[in-house]
């Protein structure tokens, strides 16, 4: 089936093209627009983008295959990226992944039977201070517990996803720590001894 | 705790700090207006040079010196490209600027464009941070509406156009030449250098690539004067100003904190980070500035008896008591990197840490160079064998051998970024690798009861 962008999205493409000195530079943003409409980058999408930007399909495909966020096959209605890099793993990311797999009945890399969720493993998503975390579609959910995760999944199932992480980060990002707490400074000696 | 005034993060706590109304009321765009109306480009460049602003993206190169490499020929357009790829594991500071105070970045970009003669600037943001792009786009919309960005910024006939550009999931696009390829609609594969971007960068034109935080620091430098800003640092004059520190892993209060350049890792962990997460689990190691920087071990001391040694002042002290600076950390055999630390307590097994990180590098190598593409994969294979209990002591040598063969043999610094932390872990925790090679270890970083507690009902992460 041939692919085409909606007229509103076509306008977005026209606008995008004004940002760059050549058309090729708009390739990644245009692929994004297509994926937002179509859900994944199908061969038809590749053909359409190639024609629209006067590029060969090989060039478009080469770019699509380089970037992990472009889906080369259909995915579930929602994509859950579980961060499994070090900072998250130190704070329970593995338990988050296993809980999701059990709850949704599919392993990472797969889509749940009802087609609602795809679980994917992600590399560090730049929210390490709020670990563990997942990204669902465009939204970040941070400082997760299994309980919070359950509520989030239920929210997506019922069509009312909870608000994502507070992007202003007020809760986890402070200009300065609370003034020197009266709590005793950890004894450096003790630290070293425990280590020896 | 140091006595200082927050600059970069001074507007974070205001409600709706991302909006122009709030940011402007708190001082945004004052400096850009002054700079464009009253200062010459070379004056601004001079202040940035005096500031000793070391790049905040990882390499610590002085921004003023980099700008000085520009030498545009007739008919060439200068570009400014902001690196908001922020993908180095452990790093989450630029996101706070893009979300919490996008107007500070935009103001810095306006001033920088004027200073280096650029009419077009891009902010390249990793694809996952689509919410950050939304904040930036909204802020740019507001700045355009006010006429701060556009054909006549602040009435000056010097057009400045700023656009965001989204990546699509690839760590390597943080490397500046890969980023430029990605900006141009290509695969994010690093280019051979030279030519450096300042000579031939975006669209083959002279280009300055700087990190988000680097450019967000420019308004304060211009306002205070380079020298005064530089002197905020404890390591002035070589490494100036204030910066954002991140801390994650096993501490009580992970987060992003602003502080002068040159606080110690001990201060960062025990004062800013609130100390170790579990009081009965002491610090075992800390990765100081993103996963590519070799680990520090608190029970190792600095050996710098020689008075000429750059670290002589800290001879005999713990590695975590050396001030955090680009040069001090390099002298210690590690790197300051992005200044975002990953803290690990005594329950962590360093072989598993290595495996977690090497998996990352295997996944993210762009594949152009054999030592990087194959080396990363071999490291994961060897580490997996060790963890699974099928290792031999020779495997520890093999890890060192593979890593050494990656160093210096690749197009971009990703190869070293893989090998250096690997070598650091083996050198500093050798006994653990040998033990694992003999006995094996469970296949993950830490999956004991205390980790589960963190995420279970009522857990600490709540
Ligand atoms: C593999 C690799 C990844 C990098 N990732 C980033 C990044 O995510 N963000 C960043 O600002 N710089 C990153 N850099 C550093 C950039 O190449 C470049 O040095 C930096 O953007 C220059 O800005 P600065 O001088 O302001 O630090 C990376 C470098 C390498 C080798
Ligand atoms: S070192 Fe690795 S990431 Fe860098 S160009 Fe070579 S293969 Fe690509
Ligand atoms: S390690 Fe998970 S967000 Fe950085």
Image (spheres, helix red, strand yellow):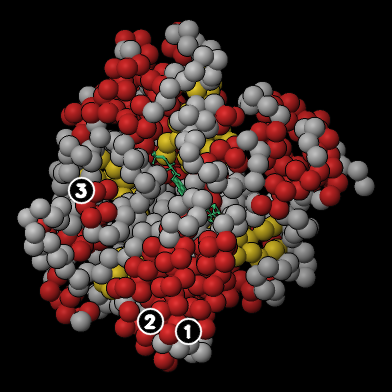
Answer left or right for B123 relative to B394.
right
x and y percentages locating residue B1 in the rendered image? 15, 51
Q: Are marks 1 and 2 in contact (CB under 8 Å)?
A: yes
Please name the residue that numbered disc 3 is placed on. B262
Mark 3 vs mark 1, CA separation in Å: 38 Å
Which residue is pictured at 37% across the width and 85% down the height? B434
Q: Chain of mark 3?
A: B
Q: Badge 1: few (under 14), some or many (20 or more) residues near its Cα, within 10 Å?
A: many
Front disc: 3 or 1: 1
Q: Chain of mark 1?
A: B
x and y percentages locating residue B381 in the rendered image? 54, 77
Which residue is pictured at 38% across the width and 48% down the height? B58
Q: Are marks 3 and 2 in contact (CB under 8 Å)?
A: no
Which residue is pictured at 77% across the width and 32% down the height? A53
Mark 3 vs mark 2, CA separation in Å: 32 Å
Element type where label 2 sits in the image = helix
Please name the residue that numbered disc 2 is placed on. B433
């Amino acid at each position: 089936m041939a692919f085409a962008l909606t007229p509103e999205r076509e306008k977005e493409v026209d606008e995008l093209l004004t940002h760059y000195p050549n058309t090729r530079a708009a390739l990644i943003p245009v692929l994004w627009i297509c994926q937002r409409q179509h859900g994944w980058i199908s061969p038809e999408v590749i053909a359409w983008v190639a024609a629209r930007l006067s590029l060969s399909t090989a060039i478009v495909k080469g770019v699509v295959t380089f970037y992990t966020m472009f889906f080369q096959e259909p995915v579930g209605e929602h994509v859950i990226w579980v961060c499994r890099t070090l900072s998250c793993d130190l704070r329970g990311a593995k338990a988050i992944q296993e809980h999701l797999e059990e709850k949704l009945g599919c392993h990472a890399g797969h889509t749940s039977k009802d087609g609602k969720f795809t679980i994917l493993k992600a590399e560090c998503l730049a929210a390490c201070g709020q670990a563990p975390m997942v990204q669902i579609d465009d939204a970040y959910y941070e400082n997760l517990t299994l309980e919070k995760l359950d509520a989030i999944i239920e929210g997506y199932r019922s069509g009312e996803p909870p608000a994502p992480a507070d992007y202003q980060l007020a809760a986890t990002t402070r200009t300065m720590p609370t003034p020197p707490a009266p709590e005793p400074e950890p004894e450096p000696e003790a630290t070293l001894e425990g280590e020896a | 705790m140091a006595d200082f005034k927050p600059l970069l993060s001074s507007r974070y706590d205001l409600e709706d700090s991302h909006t122009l109304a709030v940011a402007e009321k708190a001082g945004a765009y004052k400096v850009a207006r002054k700079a464009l109306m009253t200062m010459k480009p070379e004056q601004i460049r001079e202040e940035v040079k005096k500031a000793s602003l070391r790049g905040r993206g990882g390499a610590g190169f002085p921004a003023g010196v980099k700008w000085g490499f520009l030498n545009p020929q007739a008919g060439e357009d200068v570009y400014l490209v902001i690196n908001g790829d922020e993908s180095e594991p452990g790093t989450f500071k630029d996101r706070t600027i893009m979300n919490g105070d996008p107007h500070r970045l935009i103001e810095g970009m306006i001033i920088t464009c004027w200073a280096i003669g650029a009419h077009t600037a891009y902010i390249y943001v990793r694809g996952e941070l689509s919410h950050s792009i939304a904040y930036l786009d909204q802020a740019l919309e507001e700045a355009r509406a006010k006429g701060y960005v556009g054909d006549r910024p602040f009435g000056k006939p010097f057009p400045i156009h700023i656009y965001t550009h989204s990546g699509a999931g690839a760590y390597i696009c943080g490397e500046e030449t890969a980023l430029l390829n990605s900006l141009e609609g290509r695969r994010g594969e690093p280019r051979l250098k030279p030519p450096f971007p300042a000579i031939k960068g975006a669209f083959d034109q002279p280009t300055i690539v700087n990190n988000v935080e680097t450019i967000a620091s420019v308004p304060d430098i211009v306002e205070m004067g380079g020298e005064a800003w530089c002197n905020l640092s404890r390591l002035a004059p070589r490494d100036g100003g204030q910066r954002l520190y991140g801390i994650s892993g096993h501490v009580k209060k992970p987060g992003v904190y602003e502080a002068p350049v040159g606080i110690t890792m001990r201060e960062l962990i025990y004062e800013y980070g609130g100390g170790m997460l579990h009081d009965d689990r002491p610090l075992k190691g800390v990765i100081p500035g993103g996963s590519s920087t070799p680990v520090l071990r608190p029970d190792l001391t600095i050996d710098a008896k020689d008075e000429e040694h750059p670290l002589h002042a800290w001879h005999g002290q713990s590695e975590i008591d050396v001030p955090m600076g680009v040069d001090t950390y390099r002298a210690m055999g590690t790197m300051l990197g992005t200044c975002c630390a990953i803290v690990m307590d005594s329950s962590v097994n360093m072989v598993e840490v290595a495996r977690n990180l090497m998996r990352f590098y295997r996944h993210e190598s762009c594949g152009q160079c054999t030592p990087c593409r194959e080396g990363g994969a071999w490291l994961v294979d060897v580490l997996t064998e060790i963890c699974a209990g099928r290792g031999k002591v020779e495997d520890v040598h093999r890890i060192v051998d593979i890593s050494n063969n990656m160093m210096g043999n690749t197009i971009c610094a990703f190869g070293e970024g893989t090998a250096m932390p690997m070598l650091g872990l083996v050198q500093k925790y050798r006994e653990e690798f040998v033990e694992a090679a003999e006995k094996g270890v469970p296949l993950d970083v830490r999956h004991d009861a205390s980790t589960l507690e963190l995420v279970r009902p009522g857990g600490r992460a709540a």
